[in-house]
Image: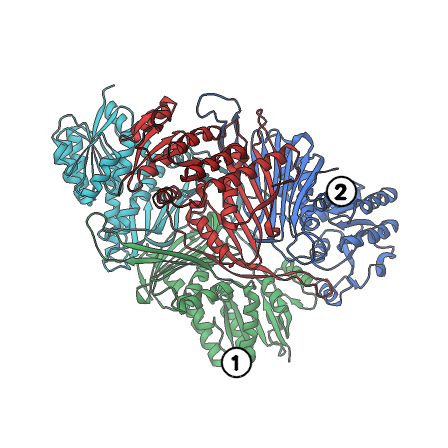
Chain colours: A green, B cyan, C red, D blue
Amino acid sequence: MKKLNVGLVGYGYWGPNLARNISETADVELSFIAERDPARRNLAVKKHSRTKCVSHYRDFILNSSIDAVVIATPAHTHLEIARTALERGKHVWVEKPLAPSAGEAEELCDVAKKVKKVLLVDHTFVYTPAVQKMREIVASKKLGEIYYFDSIRINLGLFYPDVNVIWDLAPHDLSILQFVLNKKVKSVLATGQSFARNHKENIAYISLELEDRILAHIHVNWLSPIKVRSTIIGGSRRMLVYDDLNPDEKIRIYDRGVKDFSKDGFYRSMVKYRTGDTYAPYIERKEALKIEAEHFIECIRKNKRPMTDGEVGLEVVRTLEAIDRSLSQGGARVEL
Amino acid sequence: MKKLNVGLVGYGYWGPNLARNISETADVELSFIAERDPARRNLAVKKHSRTKCVSHYRDFILNSSIDAVVIATPAHTHLEIARTALERGKHVWVEKPLAPSAGEAEELCDVAKKVKKVLLVDHTFVYTPAVQKMREIVASKKLGEIYYFDSIRINLGLFYPDVNVIWDLAPHDLSILQFVLNKKVKSVLATGQSFARNHKENIAYISLELEDRILAHIHVNWLSPIKVRSTIIGGSRRMLVYDDLNPDEKIRIYDRGVKDFSKDGFYRSMVKYRTGDTYAPYIERKEALKIEAEHFIECIRKNKRPMTDGEVGLEVVRTLEAIDRSLSQGGARVEL
Amino acid sequence: MKKLNVGLVGYGYWGPNLARNISETADVELSFIAERDPARRNLAVKKHSRTKCVSHYRDFILNSSIDAVVIATPAHTHLEIARTALERGKHVWVEKPLAPSAGEAEELCDVAKKVKKVLLVDHTFVYTPAVQKMREIVASKKLGEIYYFDSIRINLGLFYPDVNVIWDLAPHDLSILQFVLNKKVKSVLATGQSFARNHKENIAYISLELEDRILAHIHVNWLSPIKVRSTIIGGSRRMLVYDDLNPDEKIRIYDRGVKDFSKDGFYRSMVKYRTGDTYAPYIERKEALKIEAEHFIECIRKNKRPMTDGEVGLEVVRTLEAIDRSLSQGGARVEL
Amino acid sequence: MKKLNVGLVGYGYWGPNLARNISETADVELSFIAERDPARRNLAVKKHSRTKCVSHYRDFILNSSIDAVVIATPAHTHLEIARTALERGKHVWVEKPLAPSAGEAEELCDVAKKVKKVLLVDHTFVYTPAVQKMREIVASKKLGEIYYFDSIRINLGLFYPDVNVIWDLAPHDLSILQFVLNKKVKSVLATGQSFARNHKENIAYISLELEDRILAHIHVNWLSPIKVRSTIIGGSRRMLVYDDLNPDEKIRIYDRGVKDFSKDGFYRSMVKYRTGDTYAPYIERKEALKIEAEHFIECIRKNKRPMTDGEVGLEVVRTLEAIDRSLSQGGARVEL
């Protein structure tokens, strides 16, 4: 099989993980890495001796041997780089969020559609075996009717002063929500606060109204002393807890729920509930980026639509924009 | 010392705990228990052989030997019973919430003030050694400036179909918040949903804006497969986690925080943080109700104001009302 | 149905739990409590107003209305009290351990057999729903062939200076082992140490060889900073972990085991294992002593043999004696 | 500074970690990797493009530019390779255990002494920041007099059929014990069992008597459904728990202990204990192998004795031999 040649743009925080996974994918050659910072570029040279390391993506983008471009630069540069790549006939992988505004994200979707190339947004969690299993469980109706989705993603984190915690962390929760429940967000409402001088929120609480009366809530926080990565999905028949920090039992299904909503008796006219077994399905241990890299290559070779294509990325960006609007209006409900 | 005679009204879910603690307090006699349900009354007879068990509080309220009345009936009955007791010169202990509306709560405060009797609202958590320790820690400025207060109180719970989860569970969080931070709530905003046929919320997310730009958030939920009772208080110098389900280390103080908000460097202009030791202070194991019963008796004997007096209870009820108003307006911000 | 009259001897640490459960059993009257210590006896009077509280068991033992005697006194008094009761035609419940020596335990078994009365030894854990479930799981062969049984029972405990940690804690593990695996102990070997001046061990490690090459191990410790109550049962097909401190998932079954013991390949000729789902069966929440009290009464009424009869108690005492002998011989293997 | 040239022998399970850390150490060149298996050697070529990858250590051992040799091959090959290297004037790093017998380990120590070269045994845990902190805490007498050391190292592990679990896992516990407590092992006693056809133990319980009446115990197990890496050190003043799987709080110090061993009172003549705060010191996050590689290089350059030199390795091997002897004698106590 003919090898695919890939160029990577950006070797900052996430770039090294992409470089490693791309270079380990079968029948793929990581031909170029573009990185402006000389110290970071030196690191790339050390780790990837067979890859040409250049300072700018323009140094390889005209090269016709390049089949695909992977973009791991800040969001405000995505449109320019991705459009350039697509227009030169390259397939494109873009870091999340797809773009810093719905307008730019839409433009990218349009270009990709026009040139008929693959546009994948790196919603990494969608490619984890745990999240794939959750989608399968929800689709199987094992949980019954879905009531709510509650997600907490907090830790004491290094953070960039030019972006708020929502654009940094919430794309993970939003993409999981979208992939697992497969329901549209109808409106959002958010509160938050910045405790730094830069006035960008470092803690936020987001309520989302989904189709079918499903309530979703996301807590993202860069100033938590403890690290929590936990999601509860409440259903009418069973409930699920996803704890990404548990190495052995990431998903637990609780055979618990409300038994009886009827009112009966005099004093303790209480709603009764049902408690049964708990079950932790075996989750394969495979790195999400490896699965995602293989999926990207397969989409290119077989001309398929990625699970996280531009449209999916656009929907997340639209939701992020709506959340920002709610925040700037003191928590007003914003329809999508 | 002359014994104080106490009458208890209501022997439902919480009444037995009150009866046990009152009857074990020194120099106190639990003289009467009033309970309408014959089966529950029989239980009272079995457990408290020296106490007269009657069917209605009017059966003992005129008795001049009774010094104090403890009311553990549904909230909508509090005003009538408590006013009757106060007007007959009895000291009063009322279950939380003080009343089902701010109007009724105010009326009770007024009556208590007029007759100069003790009115204690049973905000039990305020009397736990853990919450008292938290107040002490916050007051000592060990945490620095307080940034946020995040509280989760969820489980799969029996619930009353005639009240929502907020009026049942949030009084705990609101009274802890009030006692520990000692800051006024300025506005609230809440989303929630009912997944039962009674249209009372069984899950809710509440954002509160406090004085001094402090952000607070409360998640209460009767439909969670797992039980969580956890509060994070984020401060500028240290952070605190209170886990009420941890039998040995209810409070942990993390010597962690943001080190530097300044922007520096080219690529990774990140905010830095500081990580130090963790510390779990020893928390005395003493039942809160025991401490609270002793406090109530001491307030009666020494003519003192209870830590959780009518005004404190009124403030919680006002906040609950504002939360309900926000919910009914789809999450609009409601000022207090 | 005619009520059974029960007399309790000893109202120390465990007595109050027995008194409460007996008095709450249907068609049973707790007629007498005998307790030498006046302060403890006063407590009994307060809690059990319908029960006659006396200072010595001889004050009620001749009373022909008494059907059964429950003995919660130190082990060295068991023989005298239990024999007296049995010989007067009473059924007997004795605290664990049955007796301080196999000789005395045998004597008690003989007396009970001769008078044809029920003799139950209070191996409380055997009556917990979790341990009953474990027996059922092992009997069902779900775990395959049993390989090992590993039990840890440690905490920072108040302790009696006149008994070692083995006679205090290990009866729990030995009775669980016996009930769940249903295999005889063939030999024991123990090491331990006393860090107090009384030269009674407060920490011990016990290895037991059971029938069918099963290896068992028990760690009991009164000087541990953390509380652990955990047992692993390793089987050829599945493995089980019993964590008595987990309120929600006391038992977990791991579908894990060795897949392949064969030697293959050059470098990494490793034994392979298999990892599958994890499963926590629902365990009923019912107090063991309540179940045990009902079982005792049922054995009396229906003339049945208790699950934990004298023979079972004798076997545990024999094992405890063998462990003591091993300890005193510096860890020598002692056959049973 | 002149670069040191290092050759690595063995690129199996552990070799890649050594290769990575050596190649990232300042002023060190990983010049050679010797690996017999062609597939593993290919992996080495891919990861270390500047290193010559050969099939046998003899392919580089005569090369005079090589300053040090790192040996990561099975234990039975250590003597031959290490002696060859030492006799050619190379410094040597050997995987644990130093040798498969005390005789061979002694021979290696003698050779190293004669040629005056550095001989480091890779007791990796000794170089973790957590174990270093534990040694510091014990040395500071904060725990008071040391009573016992209890270590559990269990999981469901791939295992080599030609070695028992003791020689694989217990060197970790023995080297930690030795380094942290700094006491000699006086005698050992062990029980174990093999549930495979190869008759090598895959589960073992080891009791050790140390100087000063300290009791130590180690549980190693390849057939546990759960992974545990936990050590308790009990002292007269405080106690310490080391949980290597806790990412944030590896060490906790409990201000708990026995308060009073005296006998007092009638009924509950119990020993009393003291409970105070708990404290988790901050532990630096640094890879042990990185620290160890720097230490090895420093010992070479400054002619220093490594913290884990041949003598330390020999003592561990002597203890392992004694444990094996006890096992083969059915658990007899074996003096060292």
Q: Which residue is mark 2?
A: D318
Q: Examine the rendered structure and indicate whether residue D210 appears above or below residue C146.
A: above
Placement of the N terminus of chain A among the 4 image quadrants: bottom right
- Give the image location of residue D258, x and y in percent: 53, 28
User: Mark 2 falls on what kind of element?
Assistant: helix
Q: Residues within 10 Å of mark 1 (few under 14, many from 20)?
A: few
Foreground: B11 or D193? D193
Q: Residues within 10 Å of mark 2 (few under 14, many from 20)?
A: many
> What chain is tagged by disc 2?
D
Q: Which residue is mark 1?
A: A303
In the rendered view, does D328 fall on the left or right side of C37?
A: right
Inter-mark Cα distance, 1 to 2: 64 Å
Asked if badges 1 and 2 are on one and the same chain, I answer: no
1 vs 2, front mark: 2
- Give the image location of residue B272, x and y in percent: 53, 48
> What chain is tagged by disc 1?
A
Residue extending furthest toward the top: B1
Q: Quadrant of residue A334?
A: bottom left
| Residue drawn at the location 43% of the way across and 34% of the way down | B283
User: Which amino acid type is shown beneath numbered disc 2?
Assistant: Arg
